[in-house]
Image: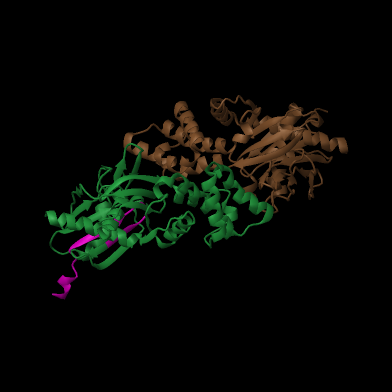
Chain colours: A brown, B green
Amino acid sequence: MQNELTYPDWIAVDWGTSNLRVWAMTAEGDVLAENGSDQGMSSVAPGEFEVTLLSHIAPWLGNDHTPVIACGMVGARQGWDEAPYRAVPTTPLGDIHVVPCKDSRISMHILPGLKQEKSADVMRGEETQIAGFLSENPGYDGILCLPGTHTKWAHISAGEVVSFQTFMTGEMFDLLSRESVLRHSIGEGGGLDHEAFLGAVSDTISRPEAVATQLFKVRAVDLLFGADQAVSRARLSGILLGLELSAARPYWLGQSVSLIGASALNALYAKALSAQGVSPSMHDVASTTLQGLSAAYKDLSSRA
Amino acid sequence: MQNELTYPDWIAVDWGTSNLRVWAMTAEGDVLAENGSDQGMSSVAPGEFEVTLLSHIAPWLGNDHTPVIACGMVGARQGWDEAPYRAVPTTPLGDIHVVPCKDSRISMHILPGLKQEKSADVMRGEETQIAGFLSENPGYDGILCLPGTHTKWAHISAGEVVSFQTFMTGEMFDLLSRESVLRHSIGEGGGLDHEAFLGAVSDTISRPEAVATQLFKVRAVDLLFGADQAVSRARLSGILLGLELSAARPYWLGQSVSLIGASALNALYAKALSAQGVSPSMHDVASTTLQGLSAAYKDLSSRA
């Protein structure tokens, strides 16, 4: 009997561009086991998705069908099987996409992303985090900010995603701090000077058009006067986040804002927003994702 | 006698971060021969600069001292020998830096870059192009724009560089078009849609703060509706150049502007500026650099 108990009722999968995470789940939403690797969507060859997934979950599979529910870029056109975008305004979950599998032990599902046609935008994966947040905060009316490589700002009302906008702030920070001339002043890893960060956020919000010239000044100030790497890093981060906040102003000005991200990134956004008079609540992205996948499982099993 | 005639009076060197170009010159400024390679400053080990230079110019050296005059990043702290920045406002040339050499056949000089302390900025190499332009246009009063990886805008008056600003537009375009998620929509090389370019420039100049969200839309529009690579490339280019023009407005609005750059880049800037009512003149960067090095040689030989 003890062995049988370890078989999960279903398996949750977060399959993004660069990482794969899997959880063995009970019907009640408890985690029995988890696994993961860097075999993200971009490193898996077409036709190899099922084999890759099985290599991570095989020990969890019994003789019965085990439902598998996945979110993220695995549902993109270049992924395992395209789960077509659903148009906003809409609930974050719906039209779950069934993927045919060779292995009869699993029944595979992918959660579709969302699209916005009027002011063109797309998300894949964040809709599941939004669903997880709403399952914990069912009456939420306000703004969700999901910081990451491509940060999303979403307006939530009556259980629906009304509109959203994507910002490449995280990816720009990575590229500029690692690959551009600024890398000489920023170095690898290390701290972030809070005062320099807030100063750069505030300067950029007041004069967003100056970004193009402020970026090179990070290097020039260091060359002429010397600058601590933590100060240079903070200035680059503050300039880019200031530009994002400047464009996202209609989303946060006078609004109730909740952040869903990794804790360090949440803290950075909260610091910048607090200086603008906004006090966001903070939510961990990993548990929110799992809550969203669990919400999708409940939908699925209630219809079975 | 014929062999003697081929020995140059001096040697001009443009030694940037990624390329090295050398010219065998007559005292009158005529080119007898030229050579070049990708042995830019960043690929030469400390202590190997003299050997690297000699491998490119050895056939041009006679028994006498041959003056060599170089500009560019070779004079940076990480280069051959640091030629300290000169502070603006100042003439583009001055305080030529003498570098001790082991080989007695050459006497080596590096032209210093310029620095601006109040609104921190630096240039190395562009000061020589400015000197070349002024040697052809001695009474010029107006704006020089030097498009490149790091575009410089400089205010020129009474033969001096009064102030300047650097924009990382070229480097950002390279990073975003080759390394970011936008690469999937932009592809390799190819054309640039003029209408999409001018539209993006104009949109960004009217709403510079929207840049942070417009960037991801280049990808989203392609995903949702399909977009030609030449259109996506034009939109990215127009967004970034629009942001630069927005910040550089005091430099071009109602001003006389001359462009010094590679011909394709000059044409792109001229197109964007023309749409703003500015009609810049265009000057080739290679010949302007050589004119600047020639002006430095004249200064040097008049003092000898």
Q: Nearer the viewer, residue A31 or A290?
A: A290
Residue B248 seen from this side: no
Image height check: is B204 above or below A263? below
Q: Is residue A50 above or below residue A160?
A: below
| Quarter occupied by the C terminus of chain B | bottom left
- Specify whether residue B185 is in view: yes
Report the magenta residues as a range. Answer: B1-22
Q: Residue at x 32, y 34 (%)?
A: A225
Q: Residue at x 76, y 27 (%)?
A: A139
Work out which quarter of the rendered image holds the N terminus of chain B and state it: bottom left
Q: Where is residue A75 shown, x and y percent of the image? A: 71, 47
Describe residue B267's horizontal placement relative to residue A132 as left or right: left
Along the line of sight, the residue nearer the viewer: B31 or B62: B31
Point 53% across, 35% down: residue:
A241
Kindly indicate the quadrant of the structure image that contains residue B14.
bottom left
Q: Quadrant of residue A133?
A: top right
Residue positioned most to the front: B254
Q: Position of residue B56 (x, y in %)?
A: 27, 61
